[in-house]
Amino acid sequence: MIELTYFHPLEAHTVYQVIQFRIEEPWKVVEDGELLGSVEKLEGVWRYMGQENLDDQLIKGIGDLIDQQHFNQLPLDIKRHWADDVQEALAQGDNQYLVICRPDIDFHRFEKVFRAYISELVKDGWEIRFRVYDAEMSNDFEVLIKYKLLV
């Protein structure tokens, strides 16, 4: 589960929780414990579905907040940095990632390189767990990045 807090810029005391229970599911929009509806990015545009009428600026602001989160960018950074070694990188939440390597790589060498460098790609200030598998899903290792002080 991922939970974000959105502070309405025009209404100083209005706060929304934006919650995603599973990756690929729409984000739930909650105000004062009441579910208002959900937002989902379809064809590059954030869309709102729900009973309550929410203005387009609010939906855009919530969508921008979601888009700005590093957990959306980190899988792309991993695939770009290790393009020859990584077949797939998936966020399984804001603190867990699944990485699947390409066939025919030296998995043990990759493990050493990944362990040595992955903390440089992480920009979040909380624990992050990476579960890394070879292409056949027969070998794996796990890396836990402890809380990282952001400056």
Image (cartoon, rainbow, N blue to C red):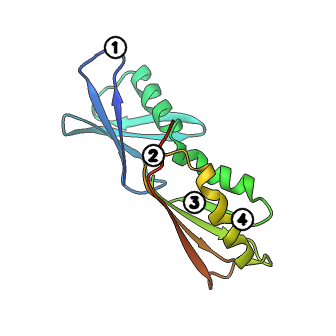
Q: Mark 2, residues whose alpha carbon is within 10 Å: few (<14), some, or many (≥20)? A: few
Q: Determine whether label 1 and label 4 are within 8 Å by CB.
A: no
For disc 1, the marked residue is: 10
Residue 27 in the figure: left or right of residue 14:
right
Q: Position of residue 105 (x, y in %)?
A: 79, 75
Mark 1 or 4, nearer chain start: 1
Given this view, does label 2 or label 1 mark the residue nearer the observer?
2
Give the amino acid at mark 1. Leu
Q: Position of residue 132 (x, y in %)?
A: 60, 71
Mark 2 or 4, nearer chain start: 4
Picture quadrant where residue 3 is located: top left
Given this view, does label 4 or label 3 mark the residue nearer the observer?
4
Image position of 12 with respect to 2: above or below = above
Give the amino acid at mark 4. Val
Mark 2 or 3, nearer chain start: 3
For disc 4, the marked residue is: 86
Helix, strand or loop at label 4? It is strand
Q: Can you say which quadrant of the picture contains the N terminus? A: bottom left
Give the amino acid at mark 3. Leu
Q: Determine whether label 2 and label 4 are within 8 Å by CB.
A: no
Q: Determine whether label 1 and label 3 are within 8 Å by CB.
A: no
Residue 90 is marked as 3
Label 1 to label 3: alpha-carbon separation:
35 Å
Image position of 54 with respect to 21: above or below = above
Instruction: Give the residue displayed 57% in from the left and 76% down from the top.
Output: 141
Given this view, does label 2 or label 3 mark the residue nearer the observer?
2
